Amino acid sequence: MVKFKIHDLNIWFGSIHALKQVNMEIQSNEILSIIGPANSGKTTFLRTLNRLNDLNTNFKMTGAVEIEGEDIRGINIEVLRRKIGMVFALPLPLPLSIFENVSYGLRMHGERKKKKLEEKVEEALQQAYLWEEVKNRLEESAFKLSGGQQQRLCIARTLAVGPEVILFDEPCSGLDPISTAKVEEAMVKLKQKYTIVLVTNNVKQAARVGDRTAFFLNGELIELDRTDKIFTAPFDKRTDGYIRGKFG
Amino acid sequence: MRKLKEFIIEKLILICGLASIFFVVLIFLFLLKEGLAVFKTVSPLKFLFGKSWYPISEPAQLGILPLILGSLLVTLGAAIISIPIGVGCAIYIAEIAPLKIKEILKAGIELLAAIPSVVLGFIGMVTLVPLVKNIFHLPTGLTALSGSIMLAFMAMPTIVSIAEDALYSVPKTYKEGALALGATHWQAIWRVMLPAASSGILAAVMLGIGRVIGETMAVMMITGNAAVIPKSILVPVRTLTATIAAEMGEAVVGSEHYFALFAIGIVLFVISFAINVSADLFLHKRQQ
């Protein structure tokens, strides 16, 4: 099933043409990895999906992004963002307890019943593979967790709101290899329930977890194909060059 | 040769640096020397909590409680008015206003800060005071309330500019994180931005209040200057600052009255020092 349909997407920030004529589809329950050098537009693309770019005052967009056939600009922005969760590059726990961090979004959306909150928090932490490590210290400050645990906490916080899609923006750029492995493990299991779009600077990570991989360069989508194909027999010379580490 | 030049410049700068501390210490010592002399005739407790201030009657009664309460009442009133408006204005400027309006507002706030207090006092005297008198049907409009309103205007620029700064320096990622969870703009401001900027905003409020409590000219012109313990905000009061300004000219040098005014200076010094230190602590907490 097609989750996102993007046609003729162009994005400008002032006079900078950040995304050029992008066309693609994102399937349900897949992990789509997006790779490319700095300033290739991959994060801009990700932030288009949950309309976070709209915060930028000189942002301009043409073309359309549809989620299940509906234009994202036609959907109430808060509803859209609840549907499309996002995990950022640096873990951003709030200065609250572990429990409060995960229940934060729920409470913000008006959930007050303690029983319900507890259920949802446990469920979200289970899905983020953090439950076993924190179940006995939910009242401790989130800052006491390690970097990898904090990032999984942020994943749990996103899951608690009940999204359908999760956007990952270089989620492991600040983590050590073991923590990275745990976050990746969580991602692979999450795709059974969610659609995942992963922007990463780490080409090997894309190869490890992505079902399909898209390569962006200078705001253009150069190539999008099955991950094994991209990494063994890419169609475009530039893709090949980037994967082999010749530039970027 | 170059080394010598470096040496001289360094020492000159050192002297400049030390000079400011040196003068503060001198002022403080002078204040102490003159002010503490009053306690030879009145006990400190009686001075601070005495209920009547009749410095030139015989024998002089030197209780500054009415003055302290006057200052506190006017300051409290000013704080109640200026904090919500000031913080609200800061939120609007930092978060909501389009670029153009933001520039205009910021310029306006700076202009407000540039108005001399005597001018504000004068405007208050001819516009605000009659208004207060008519609205509340009072015998006189020279009340604590008038002073509070006027002082609120003086505290506002400090509160707005520092609180705006604090909000502006909250990392963008915090706000984006909240929005990405589906928060509305206001939820992001109220639940994430304000708590994150809280220590800076507290410092802004403290500095604003510090400005209010030290203000003299405007309060002297519009609060009525009656040294009695105020029973409501609609009566004339006299503040610590206004007392010193009004009476220093007529106090005989070396008299009890003269020393008492210096002691009031010490009380003021201690209050504003405490406010500044706590504002500083909040600011430091923010930087950590």
Image: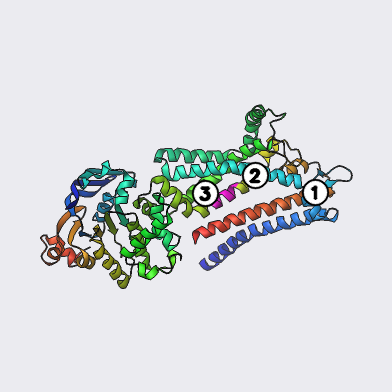
Output the chain of dot 1. B
- Residue shown at 55%/52% (left/top)? B202
Q: Amino acid at mark 1?
A: Gly
Labels 1 and 3 within one chain: yes
Q: Position of residue A124 (x, y in %)?
A: 34, 61
State how far apart marks 2 and 1 are (Cα). Answer: 21 Å
Extreme residue in the bottom direction: A178
Q: Is residue B205 magenta?
A: yes
The answer to whether residue B18 is left or right of residue A147 is: right
Q: Which residue is mark 2?
A: B75
State how far apart marks 1 and 3 are (Cα). Answer: 38 Å
Which corner quadrant holds the C terminus of chain A?
bottom left
Helix, strand or loop at label 3? It is helix
Output the chain of dot 3. B
The answer to whether residue A36 is left or right of residue B77 is: left
Helix, strand or loop at label 1? It is loop
Task: Tell me the mark number nearer the camera, choosing from 2 and 3.
Answer: 2
Q: Which residue is mark 1?
A: B50
Position of B243 relative to A158 (above/below):
above
State how far apart marks 2 and 3 are (Cα). Answer: 19 Å
Extreme residue in the right direction: B58
Helix, strand or loop at label 2? It is helix
Q: Which residue is mark 3?
A: B162
Query: Is residue A90 something that shows in the picture?
Result: no
Q: Are marks 2 and 3 in contact (CB under 8 Å)?
A: no
Q: Which segment did they paint magenta?
A: B202-208
Labels 2 and 1 within one chain: yes
